[in-house]
Amino acid sequence: MNSIAPPSPPSHGRFPYSAITQRPVYDWPNGKRLAVYLGLNLEHFAFGQGLGAELAPGGPQPDVLNYAWRDYGNRVGVWRMLELFDDLGLPASVLVNSSIYGYCPEVMEAVRARGDEIVGHGRTNAERQGVLAEAEEARLISETTAVIAAFESKAPAGWLGPWISQSAVTPDLLQEAGYTYLLDWCMDDQPVWMKTRSGGRILSVPYPQEINDIPSIAARKDSASQFADMIIGNFDEMLKQAQKQPLVMGIALHPYIVGQPYRLRELRRALTHISASRDDIWFTTAGAIAGHAAEAMPV
């Protein structure tokens, strides 16, 4: 037996290591094994302030080029995407900055009419919550939640931090604020329970950083067709893997990126491919996945 003690680097302490091949097996509704959801990010960026994906390297503020490019998503791109989702009969989880309600309420009216799930996504994507003091971060979560609840008549169950930004206490603050799941951690293809400081728990639902248009298109400079091929390839392979166990495939989309006409055309190709297998999968929302997994998964 090896007597050398392995190193113990700092740990988040939220969940232990678990090999996906060694977990209990359960089904999604109607015996399905692959759950698929669209994560539609509706984001608002303050004019004349930093933070935001860039079409070209930003200059001195106000950075009109990049601000206007992102604003295209709320003025044009999102409407084209909602039309596409309607054409294919696809639900969405809408990850919304609460400032969207004041900036372009017409968009949220359209989302509400579709019956899509609303997920908390901070106040604006011109700020990061992970750098805030605990009291300030708690206020950001509280203010975001209050705005969404006022317009939607109920508080959101799920959260994605602006810029996937978390502090060491974010899961604790979310659970204490009444959230039941979060999307910030991309470490798995199944939902995972996370411990919180109160002795409670919050569910981590898989949210992609690979099948995500910002890392793919804005960072790696993948083409529209390459991104569509990634979606299709990921789906086909996960559908095969899901014969053995339940899996989750999220598709993360931003209207100012894939709402551009030539990219939308390729997105249509990818989503049409997935829709052809609707009888074999559970096409749903992140919240529905969290609700089912919370009942099906052992603690």
Image (cartoon, rainbow, N blue to C red):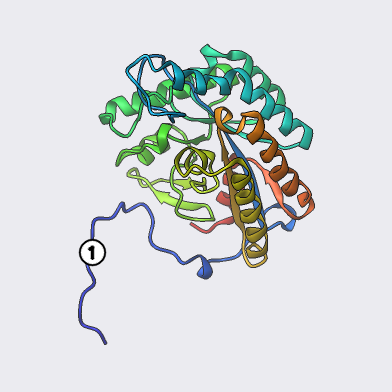
* Position above or below: 285 against 8: above
* Position above or below: 135 against 47: below
Tell me, yes or no, if residue 115 can be seen here.
Answer: no
Question: Which residue occupies the foreground of this view, 277 or 62?
Answer: 62
Tell me, yes or no, if residue 73 can be seen here.
Answer: yes
Q: Quadrant of the N terminus?
A: bottom left
Image coordinates of residue 53 in percent, x first then y, are: 44, 31
The residue lying at 52 percent from left, 52 percent from top is 191
Image coordinates of residue 79 in percent, x first then y, are: 67, 23
Asked if residue 167 lies left or right of residue 84, the reply is left
The residue lying at 28 percent from left, 26 percent from top is 135
**Quarter-of-image position of residue 3:** bottom left
Identify residue type, mark 1.
Answer: Ser
Extreme residue toward the left, this view: 4
* Position above or below: 200 against 41: below
**Quarter-of-image position of residue 31:** bottom right
Image coordinates of residue 106 in percent, x first then y, are: 63, 14
The residue lying at 35 percent from left, 30 percent from top is 128
Image coordinates of residue 286 in percent, x first then y, are: 59, 41
The residue lying at 41 percent from left, 50 percent from top is 194
Mark 1: secondary structure: loop
For label 1, the residue is 8
Question: Which residue occupies the foreground of this view, 295 or 129?
Answer: 129
- The 10 Å Cα crowd at callout 1, few under 14, some 14 to 19, many 20 or more, is few
Asked if residue 31 lies left or right of residue 8, the reply is right
Counting the numbered discs, the total is: 1
Question: Which residue occupies the foreground of this view, 224 or 131?
Answer: 224
Asked if residue 153 lies left or right of residue 12, the reply is right
